[in-house]
Image (cartoon, helix red, strand yellow):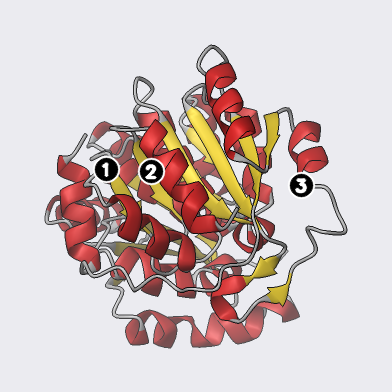
Amino acid sequence: MIRKEAIRLISKKIAGDVIVSANGYISRDLFEVNDKPTNFYMIGSMGLASSIGLGLALQNPKKMIYVFDGDGNILMNLGSLTTISKLKPKNFIHIIFDNSSHESTGGQPTSTNKISIDAIAKAVNFKVFRCNSKNNLDETFKKIRNIAGPIIILMKISKSEKISGRVLLPPKKIKSRFMKSF
Amino acid sequence: MKKLTQRQIFDYLFNNGIENFVGVPDSTMKYFIDQGLKRKKILITTREEEAIGIASGFALSKSNSLVFMQNAGFANSISTITSLVQLYEIPLVFFIGWRGYLKKDAPEHMKIGKIQPNLLKILDLPSKIITDKNWKVSCNWALKKLANHESSALIIRRLFCD
């Protein structure tokens, strides 16, 4: 499955909840398939989606906070997994779209086909699910309904051929409508 | 800076609306951090950029936040300041320890200590040096900026070398 399809399927499942989406093609895809005020599109500060999501989760314990991250992104901020683990936010669901590449910059390889992100996440006490199809995404979303976070869903995806357009909202607008939305 | 002043600064900011103190420890401000730890109000992160990300999440939820760090970490944070804090205009208070302020400090601090005032200027991040004498005025200045949805930096100098 390509990332855009995975993002379309997942964003449908999580209707009105907050999504922090990482910079690069992840935010672009989300903007094209399911733009909503509750999406916080990052267009810079690579690596920090999980940290922004943590701040939101701690401050809004009654809301579910989803982070749409990439493998290159989380490798830049692996330390955040230890901070999140220490604080155990129950409402934190971290989805990592893993294609073992920095697709937004030309498809250069990351190390995730040689190391196990799942094992790293398990070692710091996340509940970890691994998906690669619509079927096991559906199953996973049924399971996590009754499980407290922090949760990581490692979504294995293939590289895409088409590129989504840029997020067309100015950053200040992304922020202001996001802040009003929840 | 005196131990007592550092503790007073923490309490003053906490009592005047700063709800979150997130950062990476620095010995120059250890009594400030210690006061926050006593009040269970400190969140220690693995890197300074991570602290800014978390504080931004708080700020997006309308909760006032301060990020503390040594100036080595301020150097780490530049891209996060330009492409998150300033790009989205997220208001935060930075509390930065100034190593390399004295002509005699450990060698690793000398270069960053020297260029720090220029870095702040080039970044257009308004800053004030906070001291035993002006601490309340400086805190009020940063709090007022925050109330106007602007970021600012309070700089605490390292006045000894151990």
To which quarter of the image does residue A179 belong? top left
Q: Position of residue B35 (x, y in %)?
A: 49, 34
Label 1: which secondary element: loop
Task: Indicate which disc residue A19 carries.
Answer: 2
Of mark 1 and mark 3, the one earlier in the sequence is: 1
Residue visible at 67% across and 60% down in the picture: A99
Image quadrant holding the C terminus of chain A, namely: top left
Mark 1 neighbour class, 10 Å CA radius: few under 14, some 14 to 19, many 20 or more: many
Q: Is residue A84 found left or right of A58 in the rendered image? A: right
Is disc 2 in contact with disc 1, using a CB cutoff of under 8 Å?
yes
Q: Is residue B1 visible?
A: no
Q: Is residue B129 found left or right of A137 in the rendered image? A: left
Q: CA distance from mark 2 to mark 3?
A: 21 Å
To which quarter of the image does residue A111 belong? bottom right
Q: Is residue A127 found left or right of A166 in the rendered image? A: right
Name the amino acid, label 1: Thr
Chain of the residue under label 1: A
Outermost residue to the right: A114
Q: CA distance from mark 2 to mark 1?
A: 6 Å
Of mark 2 and mark 3, the one earlier in the sequence is: 2
Residue visible at 42% across and 47% down in the picture: A8
Mark 2 neighbour class, 10 Å CA radius: few under 14, some 14 to 19, many 20 or more: many
In this figure, which residue is indicated by the disc labeled 1?
A: A38
Task: Indicate which disc residue A117 carries.
Answer: 3
Residue visible at 47% across and 67% down in the picture: A25
Chain of the residue under label 2: A
Q: Is residue B22 visible?
A: yes
